Amino acid sequence: MSSEAPSPLAAFQRHSTMVVAPELRFDYWRSLHPSIALDLPQGRHAGDYRACVISASSAGGAVLGWCTNDDTAAHFAQDNGNCVLVSLTLAGEARLRQGPDRRLRVTSQSGLVVLDSCQPLSSLAMRHSMLYLMIPRDQVHAKAPGALTLAGSSPFSLPDNAMTRMLTAHLLGVIKEREAFAGEALECALDTACDMSLVALAQLKGPLSLEWEATQRESLMNAACRYIELHAGEPRLNVDSIAHALGCSRAGLYRAFAAHPESVAETLRRTRLEQARARLKTRHPPSIDQLSYHCGYLNAASFTRAFRRQYGASPQDWHREWCERQLLL
């Protein structure tokens, strides 16, 4: 997470340590976050440090980003920024320490976590990947002062309800479609994220503890679905890699999906095929080889068979029928 906002109304900007030599990567990452004291955990070395942040800023001061990094220790001082942070861990974990005796563990099962950047905080992020939304503190103070009071005492998870589910889906959707957002469209997307967050914070009747949330199988299932949604295009994504990213066992992941209509593998397959179908909804879709590759299939023939089983037609036939339907509208 960067406290330095990119230029407002621009497209999403990407910064990666992979653009510099291995021995310079951690120093480069530090240079991107001048107001955060970053260090490497004990026993770790700076060589070949890997981290990447993709972010965009609105004219109103909101920042939406996706940050992935190797193990990193950080200290956020009281003057780090005048915002409230809403974050969603996608993989790995972050161990937070606030004051001498307040310690919390944030994982992909913790849901949307809220913290006040004006409160000093130390963290240890371990193979961490998260989405984050930085909301100007004065907006939260005006519309959800109770939530600001809660965040001032300790980070907390937002409860699972209709508004937080909509907010989660919106954040994931904007990041997933980030290449399509710039200018007014990007401004609208970030303003919507802020408005939904402020409503969720204003409706808060009591914080849900991070420890309690992390024990729920439903939370693990939701975390797995979010991870699949963003990483479905990776051919090597499977049950083992998903469990590893979420910090749980393979058996634990299976148990989380036990009450779900689909298994983990079925959810992955459906998501890949839905993403492929969405890419076909255009007059000039990618080739079948390109489409299969972008949707996590190494073999175009196996992709075509899976698509036909799911939708009753080959990708080419489905696209032709879709084009014909558009002409009738």
Image (spheres, rainbow, N blue to C red):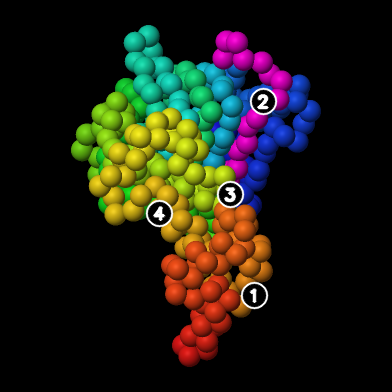
**Res. 140 image quadrant:** top left
Instruction: Please name the amino acid that badge 4 sits on.
Output: Glu
Judging from the image, what secondary structure is the residue with disc 4 in? helix
Give the magenta range: 41-57
Where does residue 299 sit, x and y in percent of width and height?
62, 58
Q: Which residue sits at x=57%, y=45%? A: 236
Give 73 or 282, whichever is nearer the viewer: 282
According to the picture, the residue beneath numbered tag 4 turns out to be 266
* Mark 3, other Cα within 10 Å: few <14 / some 14–19 / many ≥20: some
Residue 97 appears in the figure: yes
Q: CA distance from mark 1 to mark 4?
A: 29 Å
According to the picture, the residue beneath numbered tag 2 turns out to be 49
As drawn, 243 above or below 272 = above
Q: Which mark is residue 224?
A: none
Circles 3 and 2: CB distance less than 8 Å? Answer: no
Q: CA distance from mark 3 to mark 2?
A: 24 Å
Q: CA distance from mark 2 to mark 4?
A: 35 Å
Circles 2 and 4: CB distance less than 8 Å? Answer: no
According to the picture, the residue beneath numbered tag 3 turns out to be 235
According to the picture, the residue beneath numbered tag 1 turns out to be 284
**Res. 106 image quadrant:** top left
For marks 3 and 4 on the same chain, the one whose residue lies earlier in the sequence: 3
Where does residue 191 sit, x and y in percent of width and height?
46, 52
Residue 61 falls within the magenta-colored stretch:
no
Judging from the image, what secondary structure is the residue with disc 3 in? loop
As drawn, 137 above or below 270 = above
Judging from the image, what secondary structure is the residue with disc 2 in? loop
* Mark 2, other Cα within 10 Å: few <14 / some 14–19 / many ≥20: many
Give 97 or 281, whichever is nearer the viewer: 281
Q: CA distance from mark 1 to mark 3?
A: 24 Å
